C-alpha cells in the first residue's frame, strides 16, 4: 500500500516521463492488465481534475489501467457528487492521496471571470452552477492590483480555485477529515501546463 508521499512520487515520475515523451504505460499487455483487474481495483491515487480534453490524467501521469481513480468535472470544482466520489475511493480502496488537478487557461475560470466582469449576461442554469462554485475563490482577485493583467489574473485565479477545491475536500467532509487525521490521507493541489505538459504540485504537499 502506497503512502501519500510514495503515491505523489510515483505521479511526479510519471509526469516527467510524459514531458520527456518516454511513456512506460504501454509496456504491459492491455489484455493481460484487463484480466488482472477485472475482479477488483487498487488505485494508488485519486485525481479530481478538469474535464478539458487536453488534460487526461492517465496520460499526464503516464499511468495505466487500474492505477488512478479519476473524477473529472469542468473547472475541477467540488460539489456533493465529487466529494462523495472521493469519499468512496478513499474509504473503499484505502487510497492515501487525492490530487486536485487544475490547468492553465482553464475555460471554466475564464467563463467565471467574464461573468464577474460583465454580470447579467445570460447563461444556462447548469453552467451558472459551475460559475457559482468558482466565483468565491476568484472574485477577490478582481479587486487586487492584477485586475488589468489578464495573464496574471487567470494564472492566480486557476490556483485560487484549486486551493479552494482542496480546502473543501479537507474540511467539507467528516469522513475525509477523519481519514486525514487518522489514516494518512492527503489532499494536494496541482496545476498542469497546457504549454509544457508539466504538472506543478504546490498546495498541501506531504513531507
Image (cartoon, grey):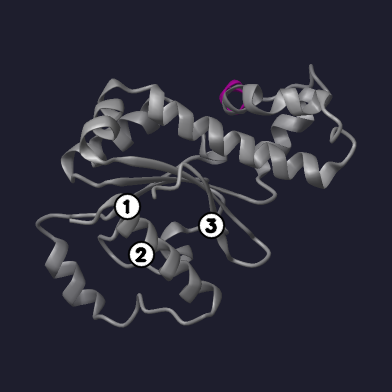
Mark 3 Cα shell of 10 Å, populated few (<14), some (14-19), many (≥20): some
Residue 61, quarter of the rendered image? bottom left
Please, which residue is most extreme toward the top here? 120
Earlier in the chain: of badge 1 and badge 2, it is 2
Residue in the picture at 29% in, 34% down: 180
Which residue position is annotated with label 3?
Answer: 55
**Pointers 1 and 2 in contact (C-beta within 8 Å):** yes
Magenta residues? 125-129
- Mark nearest the camera among 3 and 1 is 1
- Judge whether residue 126 is colored magenta: yes
Which residue position is annotated with label 2?
Answer: 10
Q: Is residue 39 above or below residue 138?
A: below
Residue in the picture at 47% in, 35% down: 166
Estimate the spatial distance between the alpha carbons at disc 2 and disc 3, rounded to whole Å. Answer: 18 Å
Judged from the image, the secondary structure of the residue bearing numbered disc 1 is strand
Is residue 132 found left or right of 184 in the rendered image? right
Q: Is residue 146 above or below residue 45?
A: above
Judged from the image, the secondary structure of the residue bearing numbered disc 2 is helix
Estimate the spatial distance between the alpha carbons at disc 1 and disc 2, rounded to whole Å. Answer: 9 Å
Which residue position is annotated with label 1?
Answer: 45
Earlier in the chain: of badge 2 and badge 3, it is 2
Amino acid at each position: 500500500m502506497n503512502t501519500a508521499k510514495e503515491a505523489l512520487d510515483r505521479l511526479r515520475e510519471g509526469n516527467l516521463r510524459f514531458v520527456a515523451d518516454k511513456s512506460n504505460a504501454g509496456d504491459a499487455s492491455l489484455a493481460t492488465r484487463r484480466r488482472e483487474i477485472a475482479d477488483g481495483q487498487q488505485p494508488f491515487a485519486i485525481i479530481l481534475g478538469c474535464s478539458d480534453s487536453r488534460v487526461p490524467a492517465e496520460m499526464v501521469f503516464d499511468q495505466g489501467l487500474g492505477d488512478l481513480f479519476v473524477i473529472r468535472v469542468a473547472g475541477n470544482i467540488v460539489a456533493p457528487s465529487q466529494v462523495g466520489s472521493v469519499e468512496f475511493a478513499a474509504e473503499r480502496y484505502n487510497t492515501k492521496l487525492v490530487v486536485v488537478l487544475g490547468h492553465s487557461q482553464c475555460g471554466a475560470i475564464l467563463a467565471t471571470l467574464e461573468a464577474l466582469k460583465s454580470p447579467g449576461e445570460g447563461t444556462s442554469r447548469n453552467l451558472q452552477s459551475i460559475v457559482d462554485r468558482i466565483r468565491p475563490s476568484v472574485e477577490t482577485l478582481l479587486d487586487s492590483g492584477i485586475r488589468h493583467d489578464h495573464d496574471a489574473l487567470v494564472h492566480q485565479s486557476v490556483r485560487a480555485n484549486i486551493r479552494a477545491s482542496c480546502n473543501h475536500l479537507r474540511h467539507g467532509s467528516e469522513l475525509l477529515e477523519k481519514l486525514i487525521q487518522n489514516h494518512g490521507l492527503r489532499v494536494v493541489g496541482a496545476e498542469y501546463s497546457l504549454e509544457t505538459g508539466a504538472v506543478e504540485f504546490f498546495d498541501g504537499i506531504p513531507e
